Amino acid sequence: AQKVTQAQTEISVVEKEDVTLDCVYETRDTTYYLFWYKQPPSGELVFLIRRNSFDEQNEISGRYSWNFQKSTSSFNFTITASQVVDSAVYFCALSEEGNTPLVFGKGTRLSVIA
Amino acid sequence: GAGVSQSPRYKVAKRGQDVALRCDPISGHVSLFWYQQALGQGPEFLTYFQNEAQLDKSGLPSDRFFAERPEGSVSTLKIQRTQQEDSAVYLCASIISDRATEQYFGPGTRLTVT
């Protein structure tokens, strides 16, 4: 069975600090996809990134970066120089292949304080 | 439309009432997913469609839950004889093709059963 664990329930940082959100996953599939979504107070889940199991390259997009390590089954998300607008709940998710249901973690609530 | 839309955004139902929640996916998107998100939790899969075919309904919590997508576009999630434990946000997501992976979410319908 697939499982996603986000051990950090809530994190609070001061603006401009860097913050890393942890995600650990379990799956028996050799091919799978990992995702991060952001859920701001408005409630809509916003897609941030997708990674497939064959691509372990880390990715950077502006202040966001992702570290995928198959050896530790982790897909961590770092926000550099955090801003108040980054305050949201962040979800890590897993799917076994395209066009299949997502398995979500419980989310990490990030509060960035000015 | 530009994104996934859901209606109503908020619904209050008395215990025992039937409710119908609507999802309009992104135009042309082949697959449509329904998730239930309890307060403070990650979304959990309910059911999904590829065009008008319901491919998986294993996540529906009871036979009081029913979903349909008769013409392969708009979908309706119906809950009969609502119970307090049905109170949650119901999220709809669509995906562009059967080979795609990124799901795009609507704003959700917050259902409160009193």
Image (cartoon, helix red, strand yellow):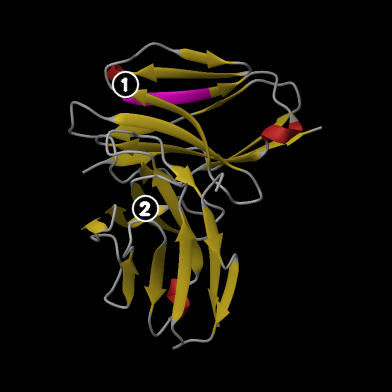
- Subunit of label 1: A
Instruction: Specify whether residue A73 is painted magenta.
Output: yes
- The residue under the point 45% across, 55% down is B92
In this rendering, position of residue A26 left or right of residue A85: left
Task: Please state the horizontal and vertical placement of residue A44, each as a whole percent of the image.
Answer: 57, 48
Q: Quadrant of residue A100?
A: top left
- The residue under the point 21% across, 27% down is A31
- Subunit of label 2: B
Q: Quadrant of residue B109?
A: bottom right
B26 over A59 or under it: above or below? below
Task: Please state the horizontal and vertical placement of residue A37, each as a whole percent of the image.
Answer: 50, 37
Mark on residue B33? 2
Residue annotated with mark 1: A72
Q: Which residues are magenta?
A: A72-77
Task: Please state the horizontal and vertical placement of residue A2, each as a whole percent of the image.
Answer: 26, 41
Judged by depth in the image, the label closer to the viewer, 1 or 2, is: 2
Task: Please state the horizontal and vertical placement of residue A96, each as a whole percent of the image.
Answer: 25, 36
Q: Rate crowding at label 1 as few (under 14), some (14 to 19) or many (20 or more) other CA atoms within 10 Å.
A: few
A86 over B39 or under it: above or below? above
In this rendering, position of residue A17 left or right of residue B75: right
Camera-nearest residue between B83 and B69: B69
- The residue under the point 48% across, 86% down is B15
Q: Secondary structure at mark 1?
A: helix
Q: Quadrant of residue B71?
A: bottom left
- Three-letter residue code for mark 2: Phe
Distance from the alpha carbon under mark 1 to that under mark 2: 30 Å
- Three-letter residue code for mark 1: Thr
